[in-house]
Amino acid sequence: MEQRQFESRKRYVAAIIIGTIAFIIVFAASYALSYFELQRVSNLQTGVGYDIFEDKLDYSFFGISPCNTSSFEKVSRDLAFQGRIIDDLENKMGKQDSGVLLRKKFYSLIEIEHFDFLKTFNQQCRQKHNTILFFYSNDDSEASASEEAGRILGVVHNRYEKNLTIYSFDIDLASDLVNKLEAKYNVTDSEAPVVIINEKTMVKLPVNIGEIEKHLM
Amino acid sequence: MEFVTIVIYLSVYMGLISTSFYIMSFIAGEKKKKPLYTDKELVNVKVTVIIPAYNEEDTIEKTVKSVVKSRYPNFEVIVVDDGSKDKTFEIAKRLETADGKVRVFHKENGGKGTALNFGIKKASGKIIFTMDADTTVHPDSMKKMVRFFKDDTVMSVTPAMVINNPRTIFQRIQYTEYALGLFLRKAFSALRAIYIAPGAFSAYRKAFFDKYGGYDEHNITEDLEMGLRIQYNGFHTENCPEAPAYTNAPATFKELTMQRRRWYFGQVRNLWKYRKIISRKYGDLGAFVIPTSILATLFSVTITIYLFFKILFKVKENILFLQSVNFDFPSAFNINLYVLERFLFLWITKPVVLFTLCFMVILGFYTFYASKKIGKPPLMLLNWMLFFLLFAIMYGFWWVFSLFYSLTRKTIKWK
């Protein structure tokens, strides 16, 4: 049989160029959407941070009662919402993405501010709002157990939504604030995941919802 | 990056390149003028339609009548009853005509290939149509297809295969699959790279059978073997999307899986038999069309196997998780607006999802082309959605199943 001619060699070159451009455009669009989401989180964080600082100043500087539950609930909701978005972004853009890490650091700062404000709120307003400090790790050896514990805490949060705030901290995050928090509650890096309930009880490696629920008020 | 992610992106990248290539080839093919027989010339080109039948008492009459109604000027019909156990022969015999336009023969059961070869020996036409006994044809289809035989290198012409009256989910999926095939077949014809002629209805130049022999009687996909044999010997197959032929499709998943097992198993064997085609010597067919088709199948099989195990592990993981929260389903799967919003964000920003949307647009364009050629079926959107949701999974499954089968067993029967 005779050698069969190619219909057009130029067409192959054109197809490779078009295919490559389409491939790159889709990846760029996907990255752009994630980037816009990161920008949105950044704006949200500023707003929530401002609200918490304002409430704290109202009480500590201006002497206004912190017992306005609607404002407290709104800030708590916003904080929880932000936590979830950061979690999504971490999955999307990678756990080592510098933009996400920066947001996480800022988020940890706001969480501690909120935690501090909640303690004041409980004391001054005679409330019994539960708190859980959740120390997790993204390190390969502990990530799976941390994710599992995170899912269990998600269910606990759904059950006690009105009377519980969960603060999550990445112990591998290079943050002095988180390190100081770990030291304050005697958490060591090798122990993740660890849960501190109402500042009193430490539960290491929770595997069942009952281990956490029995310590809640 | 996981191995399977690399496989997925490689298959997407290859899909984008081949889609661009086929669209450009399609456009180039549309511009090219092909030599075609005129109405006057067709009078001298006698056609023989061979209908092998085995236990087709429900459909044989409709099939023969649809051919008889054909507006082709010079043709005969040969029905070969392949040892049916029902009334196929008696029904077909009633349709026989005194002028010899419709002739009916009976032979011992030996398989489709033997029945077709029996018919070829009896045929007096220059062009042979092979037709399944459950297929019907548009009155103008034969005329439109035979015109392409003016080109001496054309040894076969394929029609626009259409699923007849799709009712079940699986028939609707096949309807879209066949409709999408119309575009690709046209692009392949522009590249002279069609290597599959549908067994349900295709036309062949009798001279090819005379020179290179009839159907391989031991082959379970004798139509595919013939398509490859034509290409192997340096000839090619044309396509006529304006010539519809309507065939009955398997209605259940089991029937469909059995059909695909036969097809894919046969495809592997025939491609192996004609493996020399996969070379630059065969131009676009050997250097691009068949290699990309093989690669796409390998990618699909890899992804299907991976997804199967991933789903299995995910189920196990979720059972363990539910156990850890005392099977509190409402709290564990608390679907609210936030969850939906985040779900949408996570999905829309996945490159794979964006690529899927791109391919949906491309397939939408293919479907539009098909509806221009064969008309718009009722509930076209439903057919299309079902295809998009289920075909890729089923395609991977059929291939895994067929490969597993071909590795563990040796033979599959046609009927």
Image (tube, coloured by chain):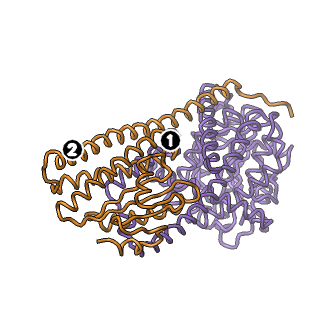
Chain colours: A orange, B purple
Picture coordinates of residue B1, whole percent (x, y): 61, 47
Figure check: A204 above or below B179: below
Three-letter code, disc 1: Asp
The span from disc 2 to disc 1 (Cα, nearest Å) is 31 Å
The secondary element bearing badge 2 is classed as: helix
Q: Indicate the quadrant containing the N terminus of chain A: top left, top right, bottom left or bottom right.
A: top right
Figure check: B382 above or below B83: above
Three-letter code, disc 2: Glu
* Residue at horizontal 75 percent and vertical 60 percent from the top: B112
- Identify the residue position indicated by label 2 in the image: A54
* Residue at horizontal 45 percent and vertical 35 percent from the top: A32
- Identify the residue position indicated by label 1 in the image: A97
Q: Chain of mark 1?
A: A
Figure check: B104 above or below B288: below
Badge 1 local density, few (<14 within 10 Å), some, or many (20+)?
few
Picture coordinates of residue A77, whole percent (x, y): 28, 54
Q: Is residue B278 left or right of residue A29?
A: right
Q: Is residue B253 left or right of residue B413?
A: left
Picture coordinates of residue B139, whole percent (x, y): 57, 45
Q: Is residue A85 left or right of residue A93?
A: left
Q: Nearer the viewer, mark 2 or mark 1?
A: 2
Please tell me in which quadrant of the rendered image residue B260 appears.
bottom right
The secondary element bearing badge 1 is classed as: loop
Q: Indicate the quadrant containing the C terminus of chain A: top left, top right, bottom left or bottom right.
A: bottom left
Picture coordinates of residue A131, whole percent (x, y): 32, 62
Q: Chain of mark 2?
A: A
